[in-house]
Image: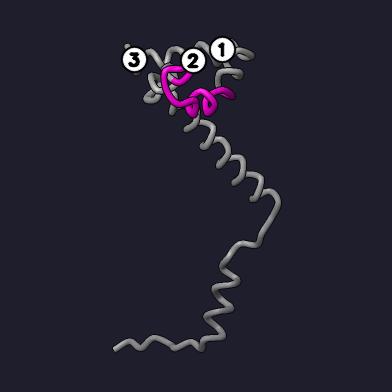
Amino acid sequence: MESSPTQSPDQSDHQRQSAQKPWSWRRYIITSTIQVTVFLLLYVLSIGPLFWQWYASFNSMSSPFFAAFYTPLLLACDLIPPLSDGVNWYINLWIG
């Protein structure tokens, strides 16, 4: 029969700490960039299914929440024509 060596709690704690990677600015910046990119991507993609809510809100037919929520996207589309083309194409997938 095989017997496994027993480790003292001090050794296992030391091994767990040494197995964790040390904190670094490079890792923090990469992780933060990925998180912000995913958040912005989800924000832009959420206009598709919520377009009619935004339209009603923008034209004062309902609560102003969606108009205020999507105002940064509207301004970005005004400033960046390729983004506007892409967002319009994506909205047409949902409504057309």
Between label 3 and label 2, give the one nearer the viewer.
3
> Cα distance, mark 3 to mark 2?
14 Å
The image quadrant of residue 78 is top right
The earlier-in-sequence mark between 3 and 2 is 2
- In the image, taking residue 41 as reference, residue 80 lies left or right, namely right
Observer-nearest residue: 63 or 28? Answer: 63
Q: Are marks 1 and 2 in contact (CB under 8 Å)?
A: yes
Task: Look at mark 3 in the image and give the residue it sits on.
Answer: 95
Residue 60, horizontal then vertical, whole percent = 47, 17
Residue at x 44% of width, y 24% of height? 47
Q: Residues within 10 Å of mark 2 (few under 14, many from 20)?
A: few
Which residue is located at x 43 percent, y 28 percent? 46
Question: Mark 1 is on which residue type?
Answer: Pro
Nearer to the camera, 37 or 94? 94
Image spot of residue 48 (x, y percent): 40, 22
- Towards the viewer: 48 or 65: 65
Which quadrant, please, contains the N terminus?
A: bottom left
Q: In this view, does 47 lie to the left or right of 95?
A: right
- List the residue tagged with mark 2: 86
Q: In this picture, which residue range is highlighted in magenta?
A: 57-72
**Of the numbered discs in the image, which one, if any, rests on residue 3?**
none
The image shows a total of numbered marks equal to 3
Quarter placement of the C terminus? top left
